[in-house]
Amino acid sequence: MNTVSKDTLMDFIYAEVRMLDEGRYNDWLDLWLPDGHYWMPLDYKQTDPHHVTSLLYEDMFMLKLRVERLNGARTFSQKPKSRCHHVIQRPFVDKMDNETGCYVTNTAMHYVETRLDEQFLLALTATHELKLLDGALRIANKRVELLNSDAAFGNIQLLP
């Protein structure tokens, strides 16, 4: 694949959230470039993940650690395991550069996470920076901007 269509980009986003909803975290990790970052800013419209506190800013090492914990048989805080569900709007394609293989999508969604009697809902916008590498789309960076990022949160176990 040398060129990517808008439908291909949108299908990628739908496939990613399905992997998360189904708990296929190793498959989800395979979508990432080794130098990618998952960023959840603390402040609405925050522009700097390095000099301003974020809810999370995870590189591949931290994402792998999170997935190992979620998949671990001895992770007693995850007995029973947390589950999630993403309800996403049709993704917007904000950048489409088939010459460089760089793409940016923007997706509004509602995210529900549940475990035992607890359930919480997050409204958010996810921005994906995608790159075409060896004929496959990969996540270079993902930014998840919570609508109420300035609220007090408990532990977010999974990944919106």
Image: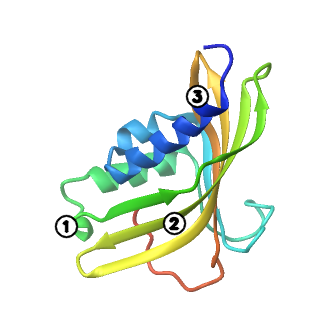
Residue type pointed to by label 1: Pro
The answer to which of marks 1 and 2 sits earlier in the sequence is 1
Q: Nearer the viewer, residue 136 or 87?
A: 87
Residue type pointed to by label 3: Leu
Q: From the viewer's perspective, is residue 1 above or below residue 27?
A: above
Q: Position of residue 34 (x, y in %)?
A: 57, 34
Query: Left or right: 39 with respect to 21?
Result: right
Q: Which residue is mark 3?
A: 137
The alpha-carbon separation of the residues under discs 3 and 2 comes to: 24 Å
Q: Please state, as top left, top right, bottom left or bottom right, where the N terminus lies in the image.
A: top right
Tell me if mark 1 has few (under 14), some (14-19) or many (20+) residues whose alpha carbon lies within 10 angstroms of its own: few
Q: Nearer the viewer, residue 80 or 85?
A: 85
Q: Residue at x 60, y 85 (%)?
A: 151
The answer to which of marks 1 and 3 sits earlier in the sequence is 1
Q: From the viewer's perspective, is residue 112 above or below residue 65?
A: below
Q: Which residue is mark 1?
A: 80
- Under circle 3, the secondary element is strand
Q: Nearer the viewer, residue 109 or 46?
A: 109
Residue 134 figure quarter: top right
Q: Position of residue 112 (x, y in %)?
A: 42, 68
Q: Residue at x 45, y 33 (%)?
A: 30
Q: Nearer the viewer, residue 68 or 142?
A: 142
Q: Which residue is mark 2?
A: 110
Q: Position of residue 63 (x, y in %)?
A: 48, 49
Tell me if mark 2 has few (under 14), some (14-19) or many (20+) residues whose alpha carbon lies within 10 angstroms of its own: some
